[in-house]
Amino acid sequence: MSESLQELEQEFLDYVKKISAFEEALSLVYWDLRTGAPEKGAEGRSEVIGTLSGEIFKMKVSEEMAAFIAGLWVQKENLSDVTRRSLEECKKEYDLNKEIPAKEYEAYTKLVAQAETTWATARANNDYELFKPYLEKIIASKRKFVEYWGYQDNPYDTLLDQYEPGITVAVLDEVFAKLREAIIALRKRVEAASYQPDATLLHKKVSKEQQKAFSLRILKKMGFDFDAGRLDDTIHPFATGLNIGDVRITTRYDEANFKMAVFGIIHEGGHAIYEQNISPKLAGTPLANGASMGIHESQSLFYEIILGSSFEFWQSNYKDFQEITAPAFDDVSVAEFYRAVNISESSLVRIEADTLTYPLHIMIRYELEKAIMNGEIGVDALRDAWNDKYEEYLGVRPENDADGILQDVHWSGGDFGYFPSYALGYMYAAQLFATLSKEVPNVSEILASDDYSVIRVWLTENVHQYGMLKKPLAILRDTTGEGLNPDYLIQLLNDRYDFIYKLNEA
């Protein structure tokens, strides 16, 4: 590599490191807004978010960035792997955003910051009408952005690609149809089963302090590094990585529904462990993030569903749970408890859904978002469309907006195209687990032990360390030897619910 190329490469890396520093500051402001900022400070905080976002946007579409791309792209094969992939990500974002006027983007970021605060108020008051004007503006902005960016077959494809490169409406329509058919068939078997778990066990009161004490023990066993992260309260649970050494998770406690926080913390802990184990060589680059939203979800769902929802996991951890919640579950066996926490029933709220019905919640959102971005439905009809789909897919209809269209924070942030990643994460996780089970002896024994480090190391070697250095479908193919295959999830669901509902014990 020539000295001039080395110098240009270093200047580029210094530039993206500066962008990364601004993004870390912005993430910290967002985290504070969602966890503890006083309501009266929201407007001022939105101004700060808009300003920081605008400066980051300007840096990403600046003449300086254009010069780096022009100078390095023609010689990208001579660059290091980290620089080349960083350049590819910067060019992708530059190409997407160079047509959006900076002032327009800054106005949009202020809009979504205000929208999130309004969403929280609207949700607390069950008032979609309060949030609707913001949602209408956000949708109009996203549709305008899609026109700037362009698309081939479907406008929604452009949004999908930002979260899950390589995935299109055509792919999702096919995969979701197969998964939906399998889930509906299994649900019919479950509903007709002669054995039904005791649902009353789920209504035992478990205090916030008890839930937190148990969850902290599990996080430690999972390998969450408390010297590189923390746990806080929020309205809508999330994980945010400020840097590899500071990855924060949040949860929402409900003393009448311990499942929500316990499994939610395991879920968000999976996200955090991913980012805590990204290779340090990627720090300060655009690559120090998950490969995609779907791969990110595969890691959180691996811990929540593959690990935390397995019978082996509870064989190991139930005594701790009984001890912390005593005497509430003293007379409940581990098998009774496990079957109860895995009951499959129609739910209105996505984050409270069971493993079997959860993908249906995602499909509802996917179909609505696809219709929104194709101009087939507007905000005035959206609430009824949401409620109708819940009635059609899950046999339940929301009685209020908080349990219906206002339950998710995503649309207030303009995150259209994100939701399918959750279902893709399910499929990726099941596929990765099938490969892990072939490569690591006695996986069931590891799940039933107090040491999950073998699993974490395997995931780090195959997924975590790469960050965005590898693209999502490359990670899947390199690890499992094949592309996306929903059959592994379908098999996992059938095996699990056969056991929970004793379907083969006629």
Image: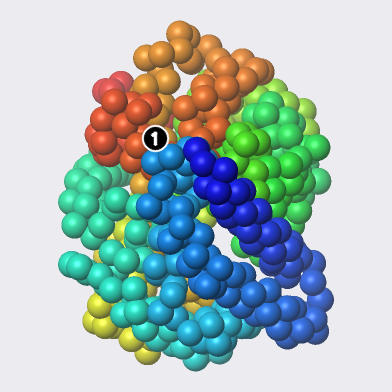
Q: Is residue 235 found left or right of 212 in the rendered image?
A: left
Which residue is found at the position 26% from the left and 36% from the top?
483
Q: Position of residue 4 (x, y in %)?
A: 55, 48
Name of the residue lying farthest toward the top: 441
Q: Which residue is mark 1?
A: 475
Q: Secondary structure at mark 1?
A: helix
Q: Is residue 358 above or below residue 59?
A: above
User: Looking at the image, which residue is at 46% across and 53% down?
Assistant: 72
Mark 1 burial class by Cα count in 10 Å: few <14, some 14-19, many 20+: many
Tell me if residue 290 can be seen: no
- Image quarter of residue 389: bottom left
- The residue closer to the viewer here, 295 or 353, is 295
Q: Position of residue 93 (x, y in %)?
A: 45, 64
Q: Judge by depth and name the residue closer to the eye, 234 or 473.
A: 473
| Residue type at tag 1 | Ile
Q: Nearer the viewer, residue 102 or 66?
A: 66
Determine whether 206 is above or below 412 in the image. Answer: above
In percent of width and height, residue 288 lies at 58, 46
- Residue 425 in which image quadrant: top left
